[in-house]
Structure formats: structure tokens, C-alpha cells
Image: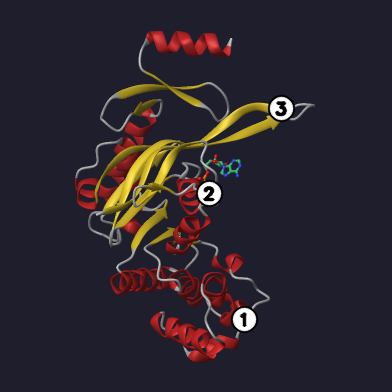
Amino acid sequence: MSFLEINNLKVHFPIRGGFFNTIKDYTYAVDGVTFSVNEGKTYGLIGESGSGKTTIGKAIVGLEKPTSGEILYYGRPVNTKKLRKRAEYNKEVQMIFQDVLSSLDPKKRIRDIIAEPIRNYENLTKEEELERILMLLNIVGMPPDALYKYPHEFSGGQRQRIGVARAVSLNPKLIVADEPVSALDLSVQAQVLNFLKEIQKKFNLSYIFISHDLGVVKHMCDYIYIMHKGRFVETGTRDDIYNNPQHIYTKRLIAAIPEIDAENREKIRKRRFKVEQEFQEKEDLFYDGNGKVFDLVQISKTHYVAIKDKEDLKNVENSIA
Ligand SMILES: Nc1ncnc2c1ncn2[C@@H]1O[C@H](COP(=O)(O)OP(=O)(O)OP(=O)(O)O)[C@@H](O)[C@H]1O
């Protein structure tokens, strides 16, 4: 059952300039995305740097205000003034970041870092709190003596586990994981990904998994959403996307997955070259997700407009003139 629905979400950031610091233009970071999240499933948001992935994640957890569109949690808008509803949502939808070190307060001990959300939302005695934190450390495979240490005393992989312990401390339904392994060594990446899967089973969690790397999410995601300039250009199940990619951006991301295959090295090189050539030829084209091709016209440094026909083009030309 889908418990979270994102409808036509847009997040546009004003670009200011000039003497009066007026709005000159907008960065169309997220420009009309729609999808829903089911229990226990993982959704990959994949795309190049700047395509809008993090902004979607932040809008979902309330760190960025949508320009328009709606986010419904069990059918109710999350942007509500009813504090109890909002608090319930904030508790059940958490985010973990790539740069865990900067998201863990360096001056606080692990006990206080993990306890922070619990103290905000629950009224536990000191003993109950300690018991909960020890249980969480155990779940994420960290020893009890981690309690009184500081973040810098741990490796990247261990810090990511601490971040996850804090994120699951309130028994959430959804974790938005923003590039959770890209700062880690390859061998540690695999460990953390496996661990995230274990935690998912334990808590029946859903993940929105943000990455620029289709190779990393290959074994994690049930559904994949390919992003380009604030929009989804291709969506599908993991198998659809890997076995039968349609959009040139998807093909390019798949071609970029490193392959260790000494015998077929030349074949792989040729395939990458072909995809790259196709990409260069089609770079100015934009698909609307239903296979329809739009011309993508750049009207400023950051702003593109999809043009369906000559009429559209004339309107855009007039509006810039
Ligand atoms: N607070 C902000 N103010 C202005 N522009 C922003 C802000 N946050 C993001 N942007 C812009 O919005 C666009 C999308 O950024 P976002 O971080 O969502 O992309 P991303 O796909 O997550 O990229 P990356 O993989 O590099 O993190 C970028 O052009 C970015 O510069």
C-alpha cells in the first residue's frame, strides 16, 4: 500500500542579482515530479549532479519548502499547521546524508547524538533511554563502549552506522538516504549496503535511495527514477531499467557502470563509445517520460524550456524578448 504520495512537486530557487538584489531568474531544481512510496520498498532517484535528487529528498523531509505540488502522508498533506500530525510525520520520515561526519555533531558523544531524536519526541527515563540506545547500537553492529566516544573516533563506515542508528531510533517508516555510501571505500560500501538491507527487513522500512551511480543501487532498489534537470525522464522497475533502458541518459548511466571483464574490454569500450555518440547527438532533446520527444531550449544559464511545437517556441521567444 502506498503511504506517501508526491504530486507534481516543484521546487524553484530564485536567482537574485543587480543593485536591488531582485529576482532575475529561477533554478528549476525540481520541476514537476510525481511518484508514490509503498511499504518495505526501495526507490532509487538517480541522475547527474545538479539534477534535483537531493532537493526532492529535502522537500520530502521538510528541509526545503516546495514551490508547488503536494506531499500526502496517508492521504493527508504534510504541510499542515496541526502540530501533532506534523510531529508524527517528522518522526516517521527521516533522512541520512552522504557526509555523515558533518551531520554528526563533533562535540557530542555518540550517546547524545543517538538520543537527540528520542529526547525530542519521547519522554523516556534515563534508564529507558540508555536501554534503547544500547539496543540500537546492537542492531547496527556497534559495541556498547561506542556510547561515550566522539564521531571522529570512528571510521566512515562506522559513522554511517551511527547515523542509521539515530535515523531508526524512532522506528520510522521511510528513510531518505542521500548518497549514503559514496564517501566510503568500495569494500565498506558493500558492507553498508548489506547492512541497510538488513535494517530494512527488521523495520519493514522503505527507502528513497539517492545516487548518481546506477552500479551502486543495482542490488538495492525495487523501482528506479532517472532524473534530468528536475524531472523524471524514465521510470520503471529495477529490471526494466537495467535490461531495457529507453532513454539516452539511462543508457549512459548504465554504460558508466564499471565492469571487470578483461576478455570483453574492447567490446565494452566500443559500447560506451556508441552510447556517448548517441548522447552527444541527442543532448538537446528531451523526453517527457512517455516517450514523447521535446526540443529542450536553453533560455538562460540555468533555465531550460521544453518545446512541443512551433507555437510554443514563438511564445517562449516572445517572453524572453
Ligand atoms: N538552497 C538552494 N538555493 C539555490 N539553489 C539550490 C539550492 N539547493 C540546490 N540548488 C540548485 O538546485 C539544483 C539541484 O540541486 P540538487 O542538490 O538537488 O541536485 P543533485 O541531483 O542532488 O546533485 P548532487 O548529486 O551534486 O548532490 C542545482 O542546480 C543546485 O545548484
C-alpha span from label 2 to label 1: 34 Å
**Is 301 on the left or on the right of 86, as rendered?**
right
Q: x, y percentage for residue 241?
A: 24, 46
Residue lying farthest to the right in this orientation = 19
> Nearest the camera: 254 or 204?
204
**Vertical placement of residue 162 versus 45, above or below:** below
Q: x, y percentage for residue 210?
A: 41, 54
Which quadrant is home to the N terminus? bottom left
Residue 142 lies in quadrant:
bottom left
Label disc, if present, on residue 109 of the rendered structure: 1
Give the foreground label among 3 and 2: 2
Residue 177 lies in quadrant:
bottom left
> Nearest the camera: 297 or 57?
57
C-alpha span from label 3 to label 1: 44 Å
- Residue at image location 52% in from the left, 81% down from the top: 124
Residues packed near mark 1 inside 10 Å, few (<14), some (14 to 19) or many (20 plus):
some
Tell me, yes or no, if residue 305 can be seen here. yes
In terms of sequence position, does the residue under pointer 2 or pointer 1 come before the other? 2
Report which residue position mark 3 lands on.
22
Residue type, mark 2 in image: Lys
Element assignment for label 2: loop
Label disc, if present, on residue 81 of the rendered structure: 2
Q: x, y percentage for residue 218?
A: 29, 58
Residue type, mark 1 in image: Arg
C-alpha span from label 3 to label 2: 30 Å
Give the foreground label among 2 and 1: 2
